[in-house]
Image (cartoon, grey):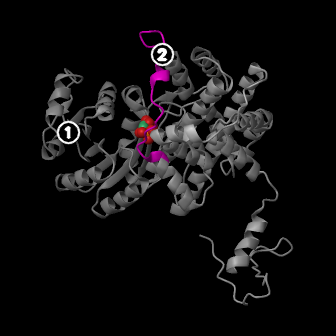
Amino acid sequence: MQKADIGLIGLAVMGQNLVLNMHDHGYKVAVYNRTTARVDEFLAGPAADTGIIGTHSLEELSVVLKKPRKVMLMVKAGEVVDAFIEQLLPHLEAGDIIIDGGNSLYTDSNRRTRELAAKGILFIGSGVSGGEEGARRGPSIMPGGNPAAWPQVQQIFQDIAAKVNGEPCCDWVGEEGAGHFVKMVHNGIEYGDMQLICEAYDFLRRGLGLSVPEIAAIFDEWNRGSLESYLMEISSEILTYQEADGTPLVDKILDAAGQKGTGKWTGINALELGVPLSLISEAVFARFISAMHEERQRAAAVLPGPDTIFAGEVQEYVQALHDALYAAKIVSYAQGYLLMRAAAGEYGWHLNYGGIARMWRGGCIIRSVFLDNISQAYSADPDLENLLLADFFAGALAKAQMGWRRVVAKCAELGLPAPALSSALAFYDGYRSHRLPANLLQAQRDYFGAHTYERVDRPRGEFFHTDWTGRGGKVASGTYNV
Ligand code: 6PG
């Protein structure tokens, strides 16, 4: 029997579609699933007459694979991945490759790369984005891990990945957990983009009083310009979808958001690395508030909002909202890139920032024309300190900022929550401020805890303590930053 180029474990939606995608590209694939009946169902159903090899044990899987063996796990992140690795090891030999394509926490991938390298096994932790359709027709793939494994899987991965202008949306991201880290940031950005679109919908609906079909038409129009993106496109389609009685389905959907955790990880990571990732964090919090559904019903009966009703030119505000969305989106990506830079510094990864934008241009959930502009900004200056400072984005923000301010102000006036739009504006104004009120904050810290401060008229790194009340001691607390 012809041996398989690659084995895949885990025949849920993503796994099945990746296998079929690999098969379409001429690869011989072997599959295994813990509930082995699913292997048989797959072979009798979607994989009928393909020659895909079904196996019913890990031993059988290891026997049918070409060496060095390549085994891709598409199973639930966490302990299940470790359990499969443990069970696989007796059937593998030095130089074999294990690929984890789930949404794993990058610190787990850091650990797995090291632990497996010690056993001679090459590990790849890879982000795979694009949902069912992407997996089948071409996802965005973000592999990281043991660099020695990359040449062995590069051809398969780049063949099955989405293509933009002929370039695959897949390249080596970096060492250890870098691939899963970049996928985590992708998901955080996905949370931010989705929340921004939801805030825009809310402003148009509750703020300006537009109907669902009118909003669908606006999103459709925006999807033809600088806001063109997969998420904008599907949002317009969602708003167009009607139930049998002709009413929009979106109106019947309960406003309580779920989440699987990658957005939350992004926020936690930003706090740990000291990065002001405000928009994505607010997007996670907005999901939490939405999930407090019953409590919100009680609060709505008690807590007043303003009586203001929108008065003004609807068309003007639609344009201002477009600008607000664009500007906030720029901030969100700038924050995401700040986080990647911080992680690269912390872990010693060599991330290719322009390459990451190119990987996200196609196949994945956040794909958009906007990513071309990011890729160009990093091509022009690979060491760009902050995306906001690139000529293209600084110019775009200069044009959009007044509309953005008007929308955020209007939201406050009307009592509409816009946490992503407004936190992005606060970041923008904070980031461009010569002087922030942290002088007072430092004084407060020094007053109550002798935490010391630096002075504007002295070099950085010199610390001072004042006995503010005349009753304090002379001992300053240590100067350290978390
Ligand atoms: C992708 C997505 C995917 C994610 C889902 C659900 O890139 O294909 O990011 O990986 O798991 O979109 O995420 P939440 O349940 O957290 O919204």
Q: Name the residue under label 1.
A: 33
- Looking at the rendered image, the disc whose residue lies closer to the viewer, 1 or 2, is 2
State ligand 1's quadrant: top left
Q: Residue at x 36, y 57 (%)?
A: 113
* Part of the protein shown in magenta: 241-263
Q: Dot 2, crowdedness within 10 Å: few (<14), some or many (≥20)?
A: some
Mark 2: secondary structure: loop
307 lies above or below 93: above
Classify residue 434 as left or right of residue 332. Answer: right
Would residue 173 be visible to someone looking at this image? no
| Mark positioned earlier in the residue sequence (1 or 2) | 1
Q: Residue at x 58, y 46 (%)?
A: 282
* Residue farthest top in this picture: 245
Task: Please identify the quarter of the rendering in which residue 111 is found.
Answer: bottom left
Q: Does the magenta stretch include residue 214?
A: no
User: Which quarter shows the N terminus?
Assistant: top left
Classify residue 144 as left or right of residue 334. Answer: left
* Residue farthest front in this picture: 302
Q: Is disc 1's CB within 8 Å of ligand 1?
A: no
Q: Where is residue 341 in the image (x, y as percent from the top left)?
A: 59, 54
Q: Mark 2 points at which residue?
A: 241
Q: What residue type is labelled 1?
A: Asn
Mark 1: secondary structure: loop
Would residue 345 be visible to someone looking at this image? yes
Q: Main secondary structure of the magenta part?
A: loop
Q: Of 248 and 420, which appears nearest the observer?
A: 248
Q: Residue at x 36, y 44 (%)?
A: 102
434 lies above or below 316: below
